[in-house]
Image (cartoon, rainbow, N blue to C red):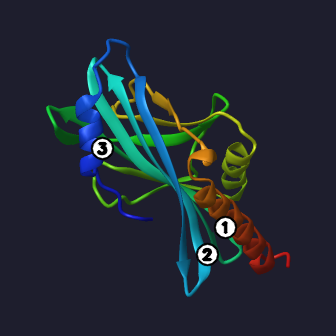
């Protein structure tokens, strides 16, 4: 997974957004598609997302990734979430105890939780069936969201839509889509039922 941090542009955007009084009101949502290669071959297809929202009358944000990969004939996906509250202009990380993808209002839970770089972050892995479902959600124009819980005891899940707008960078989206096809074909070729 690529490392992600809160960049100065995000801090500036957070500083100029007005606070509202509605809980979980999305203020800004951005998505960037990418492809990671090794020796010229696609290894990881993904999207980075940044969502700023009002939580408990305070400005907060999440930054993370959805990434797809092929390993030994298996097509899988991973979800990473880093949360932060904004106090003045300094982001303060908050713990994300669980995370999941939401497709058309239905929660799709990861099959395993992976070790994150920071103890406050969440990383979950999706097996073949759910990795494919998430892929179809992006390509099929379904409503895609990320859900998470910042309370250790369960509390209320926060669900925020992921803005999928390939027209903003059509070239990157097309590379991403080609990468997904390449990885799916590679998984089929390398799988046990070749």
- Whether pointer 3 and pointer 1 mark residues with C-beta atoms closer than 8 Å, the reply is no
Quarter holding the N terminus is bottom left
Q: Tell me, yes or no, if residue 118 can be seen here.
A: yes
Residue on which disc 3 sits: 10
Point out the tag, 3 or 1, that comes first from the N-terminus.
3
How crowded is the residue under tag 1: few (<14 C-alpha within 10 Å), some, or many (20+)?
A: many
Residue on which disc 2 sits: 42
Q: Nearer the viewer, residue 140 or 131?
A: 140
Return the mark for residue 179.
1
Point out the tag, 2 or 3, that comes first from the N-terminus.
3
Question: Which residue occupies the extreme bottom position in the image?
Answer: 39
Marks 3/1: CA–CA distance? 28 Å
Residue at x-position 66% and y-position 48%: 134
Above or below: residue 190 compared with residue 175: below
- Whether pointer 2 and pointer 1 mark residues with C-beta atoms closer than 8 Å, the reply is yes
Residue 57 horizontal side relative to residue 156, left or right: left
Residue at x-position 40% and y-position 22%: 24
Marks 2/1: CA–CA distance? 6 Å
Return the mark for residue 51.
none
Q: Tell me, yes or no, if residue 80 can be seen here.
A: no
Which quadrant holds residue 103? Answer: top right
Point out the tag, 2 or 1, that comes first from the N-terminus.
2
How crowded is the residue under tag 2: few (<14 C-alpha within 10 Å), some, or many (20+)?
A: some
Residue 119 horizontal side relative to residue 39, left or right: left
Depth-wise, is mark 3 or mark 1 nearer the camera?
A: 3
Q: Nearer the viewer, residue 88 or 133?
A: 88
- Element marked by disc 3: helix
Depth-wise, is mark 2 or mark 3 nearer the camera?
A: 3
- Element marked by disc 1: helix
């Amino acid at each position: 997974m690529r490392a992600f941090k809160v960049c100065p542009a995000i801090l500036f955007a957070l500083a100029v957004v007005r606070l509202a009084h509605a809980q979980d009101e999305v203020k800004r949502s951005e998505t960037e598609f990418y492809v990671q290669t090794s020796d010229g071959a696609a290894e990881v297809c993904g999207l980075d997302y940044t969502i700023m929202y009002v939580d408990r009358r305070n400005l907060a944000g999440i930054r993370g990734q959805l990434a797809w990969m092929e390993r030994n004939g298996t097509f899988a996906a991973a979800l990473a979430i880093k949360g932060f509250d904004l106090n003045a202009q300094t982001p303060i990380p908050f713990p994300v105890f669980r995370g999941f993808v939401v497709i058309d209002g239905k929660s799709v839970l990861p099959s395993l939780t992976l070790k994150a770089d920071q103890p406050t972050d969440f990383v979950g892995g999706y097996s073949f069936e759910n990795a494919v479902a998430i892929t179809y959600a992006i390509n099929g124009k379904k409503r895609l969201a990320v859900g998470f819980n910042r309370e250790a005891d369960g509390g209320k899940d926060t669900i925020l839509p992921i803005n999928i707008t390939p027209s903003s960078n059509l070239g990157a989206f097309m590379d991403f889509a080609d990468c997904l096809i390449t990885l799916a074909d590679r998984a089929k070729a390398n799988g046990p039922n070749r």
